[in-house]
Amino acid sequence: MATGSQIRLLVVDDEQSIRRLCMTIGDTLGYSCSEAESAEAVIARLSQNPPDIVVTDLRLPNLSGAELLRQIKARSAETEVVIMTGHGSVGSAVEAMKLGAYDYIEKPFRVEEMRLLLRRMAEKIRLVKENRVLRERVETEQELDGIIGDSPTIREVLRMIGRLKDNRTPVLISGESGTGKELVARAIHYRGAFAQMPFVAVDCGALVSTLMESDLFGYEKGAFTGAVKSKQGLFQAADGGTIFLDEIGELPLEMQAKLLRVLQEKEVRPVGSNTSVSVHLRVIAATNRDLEAAFREGTFRKDLFFRLNVVTVSLPPLRERRSDIPMLLRCFLDRHASGENVQFTPAAMKLLMSYDWPGNVRELENCISRALILGDRERIDVSDLPPSLLTACGSGTVAKDMPLEGGQSSATGLEELERLTIARVFEQVGGDKAMAGKMLGISRATLYRKLKRYQISGGAPVGQEVAAE
């Protein structure tokens, strides 16, 4: 189907005059028009560039228009088909509608009649496309399998998951430790067509070097001392589904060569066996290392890198998406203190927002879990947070320049922190919305929405209405 806004029209008829008339009508509507004089010519091009609308005669040489309709719907279900028919074949045209035709039109037809029919079909196609885009947008803008955030970088990650979930293309997920690489791998698997098939996660850094090959590819009975029976490897266990190779950069070069062969041949050979076993699965690998630098240094195979690096999903560190911290905190409070009205002091929130989080989202969750265990589960203050945060940020400046309401020790909600943060940044940039959005790590549309929600106006005191853009 067309990805752009122009409708593609294909006219199929063995009479050139009919084809030219329909194409002329399509041209006046702004469609991209093409023609064919037989069903066979249409079928040959369906898989490459399917049209949006097909207008076909019911009676064609060799294959009929009804058979062409079946072939089109089998290959491109979204293509709309209208049947042209003579008066004596109306019954057959009605039968074609039961097979999925949009409508039929009798020959000879009036130009305006065909024009209205094509317009109705185009409107349906546009509505279907808009609905699909809206569904995808809703899916990507909401929390997805624990991947939480509203920043542009996280939205792009969610869009990538939507594109990758239904195919077996190898995926390489890169990102620092704690950014959620396994969450992304699981989302790709469980949100897609293979969700009912196995998902096998392998921590390559935790594999014992002497047992690595037998763990991954299995072994036959008697292959080595202690092999009293045959055992299936992790690749065979994932057959039909997904194998997730976490920290792929930790594999030794010898094992990288064997992994490359598995990816190329789509088969594994258990230790001690002379027979290979076919495996059909999707490989998702993850790393916190720079694999390009690694293969230049000779510690990672270049051919394996390019085999894995078909599509890359890059996860941003938490320090580059600070605007997501309030949303993450809400999630962690719901997870670890469900139903409890736990609040944060402004000083604690200031510290949480200013810390660089080298351990990323994992470190943030551990921090909140610790605070809930050691605190009174009513209010989280600076004293409840790990000392490392104070050491990194400087205990003497934790609360400096933080706009507080009701004193430093008063509790504030997460929404209040977000309001204060946006107001402070907006004031610092003098009301420049593009600059404020960049500093906060959010899109301009999201910024407009939050400015209106919190009644923040450029350069004016918090509380005034946002001027209409």
Image (cartoon, rainbow, N blue to C red):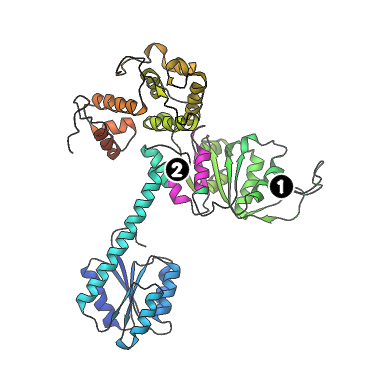
> Which of the numbered marks, if any, corresponds to residue 18?
none
Mark 1 residue element:
strand
Is residue 38 among the parts visible in the rendering?
A: no
Q: Residues within 10 Å of mark 2 (few under 14, many from 20)?
A: some
Q: For marks 2 and 1, give the one nearer the viewer.
A: 2
The image shows residue 126, relative to residue 365, as above or below, that is below
Question: Where residue 367 sits in the image (x, y, percent)?
Answer: 49, 24
Instruction: Name the residue that disc number 2 marks.
Output: 144
In the image, taking residue 47 as reference, residue 195 lies left or right, namely right
* Quadrant of the frame with the N terminus: bottom left
Q: Looking at numbered disc 1 in the image, what kind of residue is underneath it?
A: Gly
The image shows residue 132, relative to residue 96, as above or below, that is above
Q: How many marks?
A: 2
Question: Where residue 38 sits in the image (x, y, percent)?
Answer: 38, 80
In the image, taking residue 374 as reference, residue 32 lies left or right, namely left
Mark 2 residue element:
loop
Question: Where residue 48 sits in the image (x, y, percent)?
Answer: 42, 65
Q: Residue at x 18, y 26 (%)?
A: 460
Is residue 266 among the parts visible in the rendering?
A: yes
Q: Residue at x 72, y 44 (%)?
A: 214
Instruction: Name the residue that disc number 1 marks.
Output: 218
Q: Looking at numbered disc 2 in the image, what kind of residue is underneath it?
A: Leu
176 in the magenta segment? yes
Q: Residues within 10 Å of mark 1 (few under 14, many from 20)?
A: many
Of the two numbered discs 2 and 1 on the same chain, state the one appearing first in sequence.
Answer: 2
* Quadrant of the frame with the C terminus: top left
Q: Quadrant of residue 127?
A: bottom left
Q: Which portion, as a residue range, is magenta?
A: 160-188
Q: Residue at x 22, y 67 (%)?
A: 29
Q: CA distance from mark 2 to mark 1?
A: 34 Å
In the image, taking residue 230 as reference, residue 120 lies left or right, namely left
